[in-house]
Image (spheres, grey):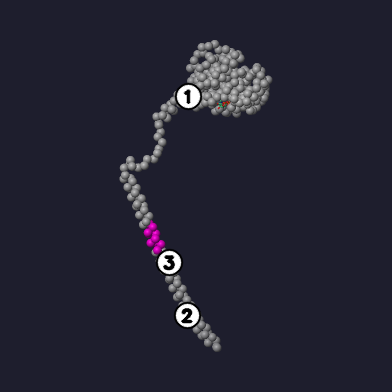
């Protein structure tokens, strides 16, 4: 086979191949057309399905709207009521007004009632224990009120930023314009700060949270330990007793109380660690005694929150009496719910529960205090 023959042969072969190819490609086209048709059919089916769904949804919403229309067209009284708690507005207003009436609004010293009994030599007594929650403020409020009721003239100085003695006597701290802080800083005279006649025979120098700054502000001031002494010293002769309710710390405020006082009343709670920290307190007392206030003494030690049913209370009382001997008051203050409730009513116990055990105890203590001179 010559060159051209082989070429022809190849051509023939080529044409056979091409023929085959043509057959194959037409088959492929057929297949593609078929596939396209199938896809078209599927899409049409989907579209029909979607239209049906939309129709169904529209029908359903129509049903709901119909129902709603039906409902709204029903009379209001047929609709089920939602239970709403009924509020008795009148009652609330009355209660609020009653509470308002309990709040004691600060008055000026100029409005103070004249004293009708002879005022003895003023005793300035700090109610002190750096331990928290031992009954300092409870004693400050209730002993002061008991002495006031016994015809004594008493000033209570709240020296604790917590202001528990102030609120315990029903004073609204939000209404106080000048407090013991202004007195310590020399920004006010005692007469500007004293709230007179809160209860029978009882005046108050109040404290607010402002006092919390005192420790920081006074640090750089001259004679910072003497501030309280200088301020209340001018009141000697105007009261029988001046009590200072101290904060639960041995900081600058407590040192001011130690310097300003003639003596200390130390409440000790009848609990497990009763005497914990007492040595530290006596250490502070001795340091102040040596340097600034040589006549400082212990006026008395008071057992508080005494529960006669527990052996622990008896044991603590024995231990404290062994340690402090004669300085411990015979009167013990029992643990009673009424004593813990009274401050929330802004009343001393002789007003809140005049016939209860707590009132009797603080009155017995007042008698002992008077007897100690
Ligand atoms: N005899 C008592 N019986 C029952 N509860 C009492 C009694 N004495 C004080 N309490 C309650 O114990 C808590 C502490 O009392 P109180 O505030 O007088 O102590 P405190 O030593 O002044 O405290 P702080 O160190 O925080 O100033 C208060 O809730 C008070 O009502
Ligand atoms: Mg207190």
Within the magenta stretch, is there residue 53? yes
CA distance for labels 2 and 3? 30 Å
> Which residue lies at the image location 65% right of the left edge and 21% below the top edge?
321
Q: Which mark is residue 167?
A: none
**327 with respect to 116 (left or right):** right
Of the two numbered discs 2 and 3 on the same chain, state the one appearing first in sequence. 2
CA distance for labels 3 and 1? 86 Å
Residue 130 position, x and y percent, is 62, 26
The stretch of residues the image draws in magenta is 45-54
Q: Is residue 230 above or below residue 2?
A: above
Asked if residue 264 can be seen in this view, the reply is no
Magenta-drawn stretch, dominant element (helix, strand or loop): helix
Q: How many marks?
A: 3
Of the two numbered discs 3 and 1 on the same chain, state the one appearing first in sequence. 3
Q: Which residue is mark 3?
A: 39
Name the secondary structure under disc 1.
loop
Residue 47 position, x and y percent, is 39, 61
Q: Mark 1, residues whose alpha carbon is within 10 Å: few (<14), some, or many (≥20)?
A: some
User: In front: 106, or 265?
Assistant: 265
**113 with respect to 331 (left or right):** left
User: In front: 332, or 105?
Assistant: 332
> Which residue lies at the image location 53% right of the left edge and 15% below the top edge?
150
Marks 3 & 1, CB-CB < 8 Å contact: no
Q: Which residue is mark 2?
A: 19
**105 with respect to 65 (left or right):** right
> Which residue lies at the image location 54% right of the left edge and 11% below the top edge?
118
Please identify, in this view, whether the residue under mark 2 or under mark 3 is nearer the observer.
3
Q: Which mark is residue 103?
A: 1
Q: Mark 3, residues whose alpha carbon is within 10 Å: few (<14), some, or many (≥20)?
A: few
Residue 157 position, x and y percent, is 56, 21
User: In front: 22, or 181?
Assistant: 22
């Amino acid at each position: 086979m010559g060159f051209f023959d082989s070429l022809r042969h190849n051509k023939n072969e080529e044409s056979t191949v091409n023929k085959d190819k043509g057959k194959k490609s037409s088959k492929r086209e057929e297949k593609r057309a078929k596939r396209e048709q199938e896809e078209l059919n599927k899409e049409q089916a989907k579209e029909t399905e979607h239209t049906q769904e939309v129709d169904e949804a529209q029908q359903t919403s129509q049903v709901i709207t119909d129902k709603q229309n039906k409902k709204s067209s029903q009379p209001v009284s047929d609709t089920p009521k939602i239970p709403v708690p009924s509020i008795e507005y009148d009652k609330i207003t009355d209660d609020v007004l009653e509470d308002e009436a309990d709040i004691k609004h600060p008055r000026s010293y100029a409005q103070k009632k004249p004293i009708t009994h002879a005022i003895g030599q003023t005793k300035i007594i700090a109610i002190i224990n750096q331990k928290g929650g031992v009954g300092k403020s409870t004693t400050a409020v209730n002993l002061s009120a008991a002495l006031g009721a016994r015809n004594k003239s008493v000033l209570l100085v709240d020296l604790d930023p917590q202001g528990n003695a102030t609120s315990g006597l029903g004073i609204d701290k939000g209404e106080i314009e000048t407090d013991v802080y202004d007195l310590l800083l020399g920004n006010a005279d005692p007469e500007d700060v004293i709230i007179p006649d809160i209860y029978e025979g009882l005046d108050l120098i109040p404290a607010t949270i402002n006092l919390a700054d005192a420790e920081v502000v006074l640090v750089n001031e001259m004679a910072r330990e003497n501030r309280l002494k200088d301020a209340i010293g001018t009141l000697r002769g105007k009261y029988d007793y001046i009590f200072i309710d101290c904060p639960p710390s041995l900081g600058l405020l407590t040192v001011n109380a130690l310097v300003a006082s003639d003596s200390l009343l130390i409440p000790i709670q009848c609990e497990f660690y009763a005497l914990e920290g007492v040595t530290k307190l006596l250490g502070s007392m001795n340091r102040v005694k040596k340097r600034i206030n040589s006549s400082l003494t212990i006026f008395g030690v008071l057992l508080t929150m005494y529960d006669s049913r527990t052996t622990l209370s008896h044991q603590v009382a024995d231990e404290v009496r062994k340690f402090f001997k004669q300085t411990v008051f015979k009167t013990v203050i029992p643990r009673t719910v009424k004593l813990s409730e009274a401050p929330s009513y802004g009343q001393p116990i002789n007003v809140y529960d005049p016939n209860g055990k707590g009132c009797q105890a603080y009155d017995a203590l007042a008698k002992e205090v008077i007897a100690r001179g």
